[in-house]
Amino acid sequence: MKKLILMLFTLFCIGFLAAKVDLNTATLSEMMQLPITEGQARDIYEYRLFVHKFVSIFDLRDIPSIDQRTMNRLRPLVVVSLVTETDEVAARREEIRYLLERMDSNEGASEGMADVWQDFLMTPQNVNRMHFDDLISLPNVSAIDAVAILRRVARVTPFRITEICETPWAFLITAIQI
């Protein structure tokens, strides 16, 4: 009997939380379902869109059309989710950091090389258009490697990503845009 009551209480709580409107992800029409005026719903939506995402329910007080009474009325009906914003550059930097950590664990840490690799990885290059000097300037590419790459490009069609993964230069795959 106790288990049944506990299970019903848990389902009730989950259902109650599911019915709340998330201020950081709700559409304008969802916000208009709240017991506020259309202007207030639009102000909340535009605040989130143009100013910043909500960190807490108390950020509603920064909106001029929302007074304390309105906020108290909205409090049980809304929830504020945690929002983490990452742009493409930040995501790429995180991917590069992971790659550099992996490379350092295999070859030993070298701060100077890590900086060079980060520069190369942030600005991908097309290996099919590179000259000998460009190839030789890449870290860990010897003259023999550079000549082999140039011969391969001159002999056949340009490299494709799948072909580079099967070559000794596979470590260049993230640094080179094909």
Image: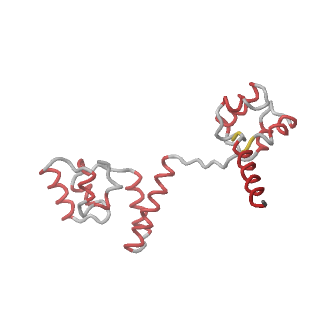
Tell me which residue sits at (28%, 52%) in the image.
Answer: 161
Image coords of residue 100 (percent x, y): 42, 64
Relative to the observer, which residue lies in front, 48 or 109? Answer: 48
Q: Quadrant of residue 61?
A: top right
Image coords of residue 73 (percent x, y): 84, 37
Q: Is residue 153 left or right of residue 25?
A: left
Q: In the displayed structure, would residue 40 be above or below residue 83?
A: above
Q: In the displayed structure, would residue 43 be above or below residue 108?
A: above
Relative to the observer, which residue lies in front, 133 or 174? Answer: 174
Relative to the observer, which residue lies in front, 34 or 169? Answer: 34
Tell me which residue sits at (16%, 54%) in the image.
Answer: 152
Q: Quadrant of residue 173?
A: bottom left
Relative to the observer, which residue lies in front, 110 or 152? Answer: 152
Q: In the displayed structure, would residue 61 be above or below residue 28?
A: below
Q: Is residue 83 left or right of residue 100?
A: right
Image coords of residue 19 (percent x, y): 71, 41
Tell me which residue sits at (64%, 40%) in the image.
Answer: 25
* Total number of numbered discs in the rendering: 0
Q: Quadrant of residue 142?
A: bottom left
Quarter containing the N terminus: bottom right
Image coords of residue 159 (percent x, y): 22, 50
